[in-house]
Amino acid sequence: MAEKCFTVLDLLDLDLKEHNSLNLRCIGGRKGLTREISIPDLNRPGLALSGFFDSFAFNRLQVYGRGEVAYLRKIEEDGKVETIRQMFTYAIPCCIFTHNLVPGEMFFREAEASQCPILQTDLSTAEFSARIMRILSDVFAPRQSIHGVLAEVYGLGILILGDSGVGKSETALELIKLGHRLVADDVVEIHCVSGNILMGTGANKIIAHHMEIRGLGIINVTHLYGIGAIRDKKQIQLVVKLEIWDASKNYDRIGTEEQYMEILGVNIPKLEIPVKPGRNIPIIIETAAMNERLKKMGYNAAREFNKNILKWIESDNARAVYFGSEDII
């Protein structure tokens, strides 16, 4: 069971637009809107309506399409109240009717008596099921908040980390000026989708696209650089950790050994970039983004360089052996 507390009222209050909109409205059982949705899954209660309650998945959202509503009408015509009454003895989160369908008076009466919410949508059953599963998967995804900056650079989601004062926000500001986009500054909320995709967004929508620049204060990126300089969420595909240059530390100069950072059980490629006067960090991050895209396309510059060096050494040694040997007559 999911630990997140998410109620039917929360489902109705979700700010969903366009292809995510569920078009839900409550048509009965309003007293039960505080019922908790604990499992991100659906159930079509056809067997339960026929009186078979073994393995009844009552703790899921109960979706009623045209088939279930037609059967409900037959039950009511036959006066089989006991089946409907028995179904509502279970702690059902809510009943959702698609195609703008409406249950009969008997169903309404039993739902009101058990304080079970009845919701309605104009979407088809197949379309509603696809949308609600996508939304519930996002709502119940594991989450973690990280102190850092998330930006989109050349289409790649880059999470910039580092100690306070190292220059994360200033780097992100320069990237925005170069035409890239800000997702979140200071606190990035990360959630894992489908078990292997990390999506990052601002922890607070009101302040997500504001930045704190020391010596300047709070700035509104949207107002300064336009709507094209921001986006609400982005998949995290690369982690860049900024740190003050340490002369005693050996930094990777070739790039053959790849590092990873584990976030919510997912390994993300990680780069450690030392910061010191004279280094153009935004340009380095731009280059890192393009290099990472090349890697995803199957080309690794560091490995290719290493391979060419080995070939050169082998061929050079072969020539030395050949020309250094004495001809035997």
Image (spheres, rainbow, N blue to C red):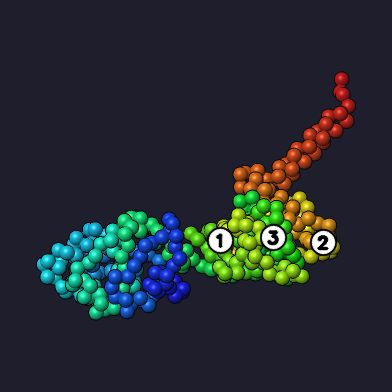
At 72% from the left and 68% from the top, the residue drawn is: 213
* Element assignment for label 3: helix
What amino acid is found at the position of numbered circle 1 in the picture? Asp
Indicate which disc, 3 or 2, sits on the residue closer to the N terminus: 3
x, y percentage for residue 157?
61, 56
Q: CA distance from mark 3 to mark 1?
A: 16 Å
User: Which sits in the foreground, 307 or 329?
Assistant: 307
Reply above or below: 88 against 325. Answer: below
The residue sitting at the front extreme is 223
Q: Say few, some or many: other residues with alpha carbon within 10 Å of mark 3 (under 14 / 14 to 19 / 20 or more).
A: many
Q: Residue at x 74, y 65 (%)?
A: 167
Specify which label sits upstream in the sequence, 2 or 1: 1
Tell me if residue 190 can be seen. yes
- Which secondary structure lies at badge 2? loop
Q: Nearer the viewer, residue 299 or 109?
A: 109
Quarter of the image where one finds residue 223: bottom right
Marks 2/1: CA distance?
A: 31 Å
Q: Which mark is residue 172?
A: 3
Q: Position of residue 11 (x, y in %)?
A: 40, 69
Of mark 3 and mark 1, the one earlier in the sequence is: 3
Tell me, for residue 276, which label it has, or none. 2
In which quarter of the view is residue 33 placed?
Answer: bottom left
Q: Are marks 2 and 1 in contact (CB under 8 Å)?
A: no
Circle 3 or circle 2, nearest the eye: 3
Name the residue rendered at 80%, 39% in the picture.
313
Q: Amino acid at mark 2?
A: Lys
Which kind of residue does numbered mark 3 sit on? Ala
Residue beneath label 1, please? Answer: 232
Query: Residue 122 got which mark?
Result: none
